Image: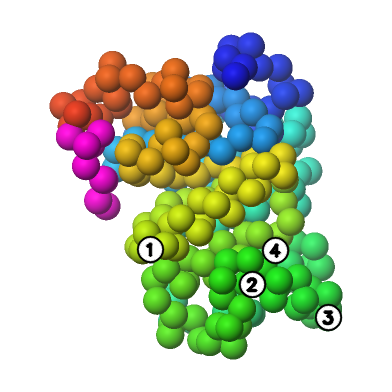
Amino acid sequence: MVKPDRLTDLECAVVVQDLTVAYKEKPVLWDIDLKIPKGVLLAIVGPNGAGKTTLLRSIMGMIKPAAGNVAIFGQSIAAKKRSIGYMPQRGTVDWDFPTDALDVVMMGRYGHIGWFKRPSVNDKKLSLEALDRVGMADFASRPLNQLSGGQQQRVFLARALVQDADLYFMDEPFVGVDAVTEQAIIELLKELRNQSKTVVVVHHDLQTLADYFDWVSLLNVRQIAYGSVADVLTPENLKITYGGRSSFLMHNPVIT
């Protein structure tokens, strides 16, 4: 596997340079450099408050950095927005919003059709196919607030899939799901990777890193290390990232 320092910009889906983000002058991310290769499954890992979600949103242009630059497939974020799919953190979604599963998935088509146009028959067909891929076809007309946590996550995964992107960002997709749903999600993410898509996931469980992901970024305001899971997941790097909790975390799932 290619080493991070040997990656050229042309080999990368994402290039982050000197990224700093601050809230009320307090740094949340500090001087981040990150190159994400095309066609990998990458996990962003670190303790609570490490800036993982902030990094994801900054790369997507949802948060304006205090300093630094981001390139998506060698271009600006604005130029490549249609190449990006996004699955938000479950806790940020209003699950009582009066809509059904199919309508939520069709929202993922608006990047292609525009916000002021009605979805076409083909958009509905693609959305139903996405629901079928995540095992939710039978729940297309079910109100969102009547779905279980795992079913809701599957719906939002389907919304990301129907965007037909080259680069996917997913914020804690495994939180609040059962083992069957988690396995179904990771199989879909691996399928995307095998289609040469790039998938970036905020993740918590150190135990599953080696099974689920190719690359990992260890983050705690600063980037501690990044590269292949085998190279990065060392006791030394984990101790710097998590402090004295690293040994415990390697043998116990992280609960958030």
Q: Which mark is drawn over residue 177? A: 1
The residue wearing badge 3 is 121
Height in image: 177 above or below 6? below
Q: Name the N-terminal-most of marks 4 and 1.
A: 4
> How far separated are the C-alphas under marks 4 and 2?
11 Å
Q: Name the N-terminal-most of marks 3 and 4.
A: 3
Circle 4: element type = loop
Q: Please name the residue shown 35% across and 44% down the image.
A: 204
Amino acid type at circle 2 is: Asp
User: Magenta segment range?
Assistant: 248-256
Q: Quadrant of the N terminus?
A: top right
Q: Is residue 96 left or right of residue 104?
A: left
Of labels 4 and 2, the one closer to you = 2
Instruction: Find residue 28 and report its horizontal and vertical position in percent.
Output: 38, 36
> How far separated are the C-alphas under marks 1 and 2?
18 Å
Q: Please name the residue shown 61% across and 78% down the image.
A: 137
Instruction: Find residue 67 and report its horizontal and vertical position in percent.
Output: 54, 28
The residue wearing badge 4 is 162
Circle 1: element type = loop
> How far separated are the C-alphas under marks 3 and 4?
14 Å
Closer to the camera in the image, 208 or 20 = 208
Amino acid type at circle 1 is: Val
Of labels 1 and 2, the one closer to you = 2
Q: Is residue 74 left or right of residue 186?
A: right
Of labels 4 and 1, the one closer to you = 1
Of labels 3 and 1, the one closer to you = 1
> How far separated are the C-alphas under marks 4 and 1?
21 Å
Amino acid type at circle 3 is: Val
Q: Is residue 20 left or right of residue 245?
A: right
**Tag 3 and tag 1, C-beta contact below 8 Å:** no
Q: Which mark is drawn over residue 132? A: 2
Amino acid type at circle 4 is: Val
